Amino acid sequence: MTVKIQAFALTLLCLFSPLTFSKNYDHLKEITLNELINIVGDTTGKSFVINDTLEGSVKLFIDFDNATNEQLFELLNQTLLLNNYGLVDKGSFYVVMPTGHLKNKSSKIDTTGNPQSSEVITETIELKNIKASNAVDILRPLVSKYGYITQIESSRVNSIIIVDHADNIQRLSDLIIELDQP
């Protein structure tokens, strides 16, 4: 797990280059997930509800003072995912929970077409040319381990419902477009 976190931190280093170190975090710093959530919350103004079982730490190479709110929020999302946690948007705050519980807690149905990449969303996709049950059989192995996919088939409806991270749903949607051809 430490190797994944270090690789992720190096990726972030490339994304946020050139880096100057923050006055508060002037060296490579190992911080707990709770500390990271507090920093992101203080900086972005977002509120988080944290379960007492939240554990883990990360080494960061980032200038918190010069990162945008969007970059910090995505950093938090990706760091939590690497540690098997995720965020559920409850409107005025976010709940941090183990990824195994996310499929049951997605409260957001994407209607904008532009969700955060690691945000857990629910999307319904109508199929025109292939049976929903066939699509589900093809897509199920591609849904994340904490995601969910099912079909709705009747004489009037031929759709699938997916609960997963927005970036994975986008990948699956692209594949569905290719599969659902006449």
Image: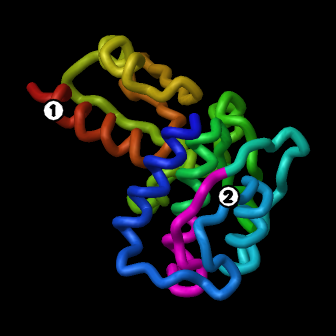
Q: Secondary structure at mark 2?
A: strand
Front-most of 5 and 114?
A: 5
Task: Name the residue at 73% across, 44% down.
Answer: 56
Between circles 2 and 1, the one closer to the viewer is 2
Report the Cα–Cα distance between label 2 and label 1.
Answer: 44 Å
* Viewer-nearest residue: 155 or 113: 113
Image coords of residue 94 (percent x, y): 73, 58
Query: What residue do we see at 23% from left, 33% from top?
Result: 175
In which quadrant is the N terminus drawn? top right
- Total numbered labels: 2
Q: Residue at x 9, y 25 (%)?
A: 182
Please state if 86 lies on the left or on the right of 175 as rendered.
right
Q: Nearer the viewer, residue 93 or 5?
A: 5
Amino acid type at mark 1:
Glu
**Front-most of residues 66 and 130:** 66
Contact, CB < 8 Å: mark 2 with mark 1? no
Question: Which element type, helix, strand or loop, lies under badge 1?
Answer: helix
- In the displayed orientation, state which residue is furthest to the left: 182
At x 65%, y 64%, the residue is 29
Q: Which residues are magenta?
A: 58-73
**Spot occupied by residue 81 in the image (x, y as percentages of width and height):** 58, 43
Residue type of the residue flagged with mark 2: Glu
Q: Is residue 77 visible?
A: yes
- Residue 128, image x and y in percent? 24, 29
Asked which colour scheme the image uses, the reply is: rainbow
Say if 6 sits above or below 90 in the image. Answer: above
Q: Label 2 belongs to which residue?
A: 30
Q: Residue furthest front?
A: 27
Label 1 sits on residue:
178
Q: Can residue 111 be seen by looking at this rendering?
A: no
Q: Is residue 44 above or below residue 148?
A: below
Image height check: is 168 above or below 148?
A: below
